[in-house]
Structure formats: structure tokens, C-alpha cells
Image (cartoon, rainbow, N blue to C red):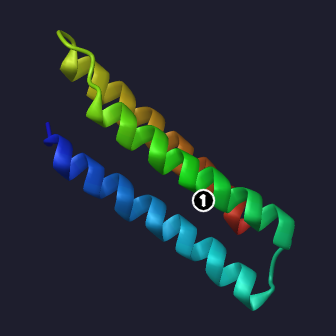
């Protein structure tokens, strides 16, 4: 299991990449501007939510907590990525 700092860095890196993709698409005007703005807000909320969840771990069941957290984060990142591509 990775430590909290590494998990936070991973979350920051992935959400940063998603945000950069949104900005690049909006600058190239290849997508719906309003939809991309909404997706950027969702990426920021995703980052803040998961960093907060990593910071406040449930005691006693850390392994299960982090496994579930990683799985949920991966699903949400994949969903956002697909929505950015289709924007």
C-alpha cells in the first residue's frame, strides 16, 4: 500500500492531466465550451474530495478503505476522461 503522500501526488497528477486536457480542448475550440467548463469544475471537485478522503482515513480498516478509494477514483477518472473526449 502506498503512503498518503504518494496517493495525494497521484491524485494531483491525474486530475491535473484531466484539467489540462479540458483547457487544451477549450483553447482549440474543438468542444462545447459550457460542457468543458462544467467538466473542469468536476475535475477540481474530484481532486478536493479525494485529497480530503485520503487525509481522513477510517481507522481500523485502512486496507479496505484504500482499496475501495482507489477503485472509486479509477472509475471516476475513466468516466471523466471519456466525457472529456466526447465533449
Rendered view: 5 above or below 24: above
**Residue of label 1:** 81
x and y percentages locating residue 45 in the rendered image? 56, 47
Q: Which one is in front, 20 or 85?
A: 20
Left-right relation of 2 to 55 = left
> Please, what secondary structure does the residue beneath circle 1 have?
helix
Q: Position of residue 21 (x, y in %)?
A: 59, 74
Q: Residue at x 75, y 65 (%)?
A: 37
Q: Check the image and report above or below for 41 versus 84.
A: above
- The quadrant holding residue 54 is top left
Q: Give the residue drawn at x 13%, y 41%.
A: 3
Q: 30 above or below 37?
A: below
Q: The C terminus appears in which quarter of the rendering?
A: bottom right
**What residue occupies the far top of the structure in this picture?**
60
Residue 43: x %, y % from top left: 57, 55
The residue under the point 55% across, 43% down is 76
> Left or right of 3: which side holds 44?
right
Whether residue 82 is visible = no
Residue 31 x %, y %: 81, 76
Q: Taking the image as drawn, is residue 37 in sight?
A: yes
Q: Quadrant of the N terminus?
A: top left
Q: Residue furthest bottom?
A: 28
Residue 19 in which image quadrant? bottom right
Residue at (53% x, 46% y) in the render: 46
Amino acid at each position: 500500500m502506498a503512503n498518503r503522500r504518494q496517493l495525494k501526488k497521484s491524485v494531483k497528477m491525474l486530475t491535473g492531466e484531466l484539467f489540462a486536457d479540458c483547457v487544451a480542448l477549450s483553447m482549440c475550440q474543438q468542444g462545447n465550451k459550457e460542457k468543458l467548463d462544467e467538466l473542469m469544475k468536476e475535475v477540481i471537485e474530484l481532486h478536493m474530495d479525494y485529497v480530503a478522503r485520503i487525509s481522513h482515513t477510517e481507522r481500523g480498516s485502512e486496507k479496505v478503505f484504500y482499496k475501495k478509494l482507489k477503485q472509486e477514483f479509477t472509475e471516476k477518472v475513466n468516466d471523466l476522461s471519456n466525457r472529456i473526449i466526447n465533449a
